Amino acid sequence: MLSLEGLSCAACVAKVQKALQAVPQVSQVQVNLAEQTALVSGNATPQSLVNAVQQAGYGAEVVEDQALRAEKQQRKTTQEIHQRKWQGFVALGFGAALMLWGLLGGSMQVNASNRPYWLIVGVATLLVMILTGKHFYQKAGQNLLHRTATMDTLVALGTGTAWLYSMFVCLKPEFFPENARHLYFEAAAMIIGFINLGKMFEAKAKQHSSQALGKLLDLTPKIVHLVTSQDTRDIPLSEVKAGMILRLQTGERVAVDGTIREGQGWFDESMLTGEPIPVQKQRGDKLSAGTLVADGSVLYQAEQIGEQTTLANIIKLVRQAQSSKPKIGLLADKIAGVFVPVVITIALVAALIWFLYGSTPQFSYALVIFTTVLIIACPCALGLATPMSIISGIGRAAELGILVRDADALQKAATADTIVFDKTGTLTKGSPKVTALYCFNDYNEQQVSEFAASLEQGASHPLAKGIVQFNQEKGFSIKALDEFNTLQGVGVSGVVDGKNAILGNRTLMAQQGVDIQPAMGIFQQETAMGATVVFLAIDQQLAGMFIITDPLREDSEQALQRLHQQGYELIMLTGDQEKTAQFLAKDTAIDRVIAGVLPEQKANVIKALQQQGRKVVMVGDGINDAPALAQADVSIAMGSGSDIAIETAELTLMRHSISAVADALCLSKGILRNMKQNLFGAFIYNILGIPIAAGLLYPLFGILLNPMIGGLAMALSSITVVSNANRLLKFKVQ
């Protein structure tokens, strides 16, 4: 990631993006105007990227530490706010004094008696313009050298033309008719004042929009309590190493990821999961950096530190998502690429028409038209419309425990009409328990349990964990396992204690020719009650049958009802038996159940729905869900799920709740609506503002915009876009 300096509008973004994309071995570039950052993918050297940005006329440095970058950005923004504030007030104060002179009856035209005074005013105006608007002229000069144009070019051209015309009138009044000797010194100063104040308010709003990410960065303490065999002492967080034992007390935040070794406590994980209720944790439980000890005291061992913690990964994902662009934003980017040259052309053409066909004094009117068109055109609002909505919306999503990998997923989620849920671990709690064990053919409970647990000892599937946990609770042992095989979607096989054993569903037993007729009565009864049945066969003979139940999450029923009322079609997709799935779905708002689906078939189900014209959201948590997640239009993974599911998904829910799915979809609609409002406002402003500035209303109503009004309108357009985006920071899900 690069930290950028000097970007002022969408044209700057297009320029930097083009420069970075031209660097060899760069595969992808995401430039963020609001955050002044560039996220670059590829194998290019950092120095080559910095050089490319500098050659384009902007500042850049490589971000080594996110917290340090955020601190520097905060200082820069605070400095910019202070600088723009005094520059704005000085320029407005000077311009207002000149305007007041005219309003109180003073002459704003040059004549023989007042000419020396106006020459002094002209020099004073130049000094004020340099003092308060030097940055506009410097950047415009750099743009000229690089043969490009940005917002700074428009401001410099507009104010510079107004001052040059006025100064020329003062120096050579005899070249102008008497009625064309009006001066525009006050307009040049006040335009710079209005734009500076607009940029100040814009910077304040941007600072506010980055608060969500700032809160995440502030979650880790600077000092930790290190426990050694001799004593307990405080050390800086930067000195913490994996394996160290750290002490935590009530009111303190967890510094790094780790595992509790001693003690217990209640931990507030709301900033990571959005869940306000503290969670009890004790010896052996995992802790995440940034969480707060609400009550209790523990000793824990540091495991993941620095950029490897869950919190660091969340910050990285949020930063990456805030730099990404949805498809709706690409239209603004294309327009921004040609916006400034087109505006300059329109200003020249409009001025020429007024000079040739306008009212007298033609030159004076042409100047007003030229200046006003340049000043009122606002590529800033266009450039900020999408990024500000994304930054605010993704920041709010992080507060709700929703991690967004790519902003385009939000646009797609907002237009989805079908939601497909995996069953185990997504709709259900994902912690199945063995509620009954039936034995057959002279095998006893210990033999069946030990054989099954031995087969499942290294597996990560929730059903496997339930069987291993049952074996542990019974105090039974684990036997040696050889020739282990995963039979995808149906079960596992291996050699345990010298005997061939298979463990899985009814389909597997049929494939292997195992007679399960003696168990069919119990099987049908249990599956009708929503239980999952797992068979164990030893040497081709039925040995046992596990009855496993995995109840729905507490909020699943209510959340599904909420989604159903919002008009989504809800589908349960599972590899489980039809009866088990139907039993779970019968009291919920699930519209369809698709059961008995193998992992590789799940993606085909999603594809079939898409071929019917549906926009599909897939919600899953397991390794077997990864293909379906990749196929879906929008993929959502439960944060408690497998790493591959989370890596594949575009949205990750840190809160283990189906309500978070409803929240994510509701928020995505809010963000898309906000982006459309901003883009509409920016487009309409320019579509209406530029023709009015060009004098369209003059023949009909005699209305001609003053360049000062253009400067005020330009400032207000940017402030409006940023303020509207900031409403997302307080977005309330319905």
Image: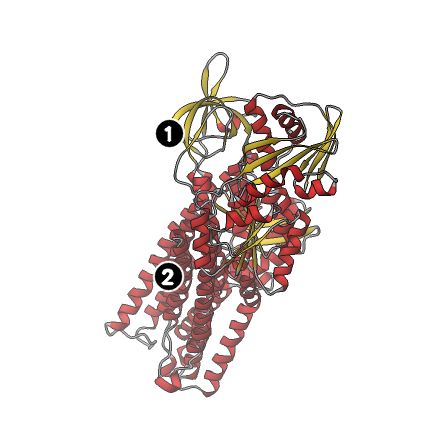
Helix, strand or loop at label 1? It is loop
Give the tally of numbered discs.
2
627 or 685, which lies in front? 627
Mark 2 and mark 1 lie on one chain; the one further toward the N terminus is 2
Point 42% across, 61% down: residue = 721
Disc ID at residue 460: none
Residue 517 position (above or below residue 98): above
81 or 723, which lies in front? 723
Helix, strand or loop at label 2? It is helix
Could you tell me if residue 481 is visible in this image?
yes
Where residue 88 appears, as percent x and y from the top left, is 36, 58
Query: From the viewer's perspective, is 478 left or right of 371?
Result: right
Amino acid type, residue under disc 1 in the picture = Gly
Point 62% across, 58% down: residue = 18
User: Mark 2 = which residue?
Assistant: 193
Where residue 124 appears, as percent x and y from the top left, is 37, 62
Give the CA separation, mark 2 to mark 1: 47 Å
Where residue 6 appears, as percent x and y from the top left, is 51, 54
Amino acid type, residue under disc 2 in the picture = Gly
Query: From the viewer's perspective, is 565 left or right of 646?
Result: left
Q: Quadrant of residue 126 in the image?
A: bottom left
Could you classify mark 1 by the number of other residues whose Cα lies within 10 Å: few (under 14), some (14-19), or many (20 or more)? some
User: Mark 1 = which residue?
Assistant: 251
Could you tell me if residue 396 is visible in this image?
no
Where residue 514 appears, as percent x and y from the top left, is 72, 38
Query: From the viewer's perspective, is 266 left or right of 142?
Result: left
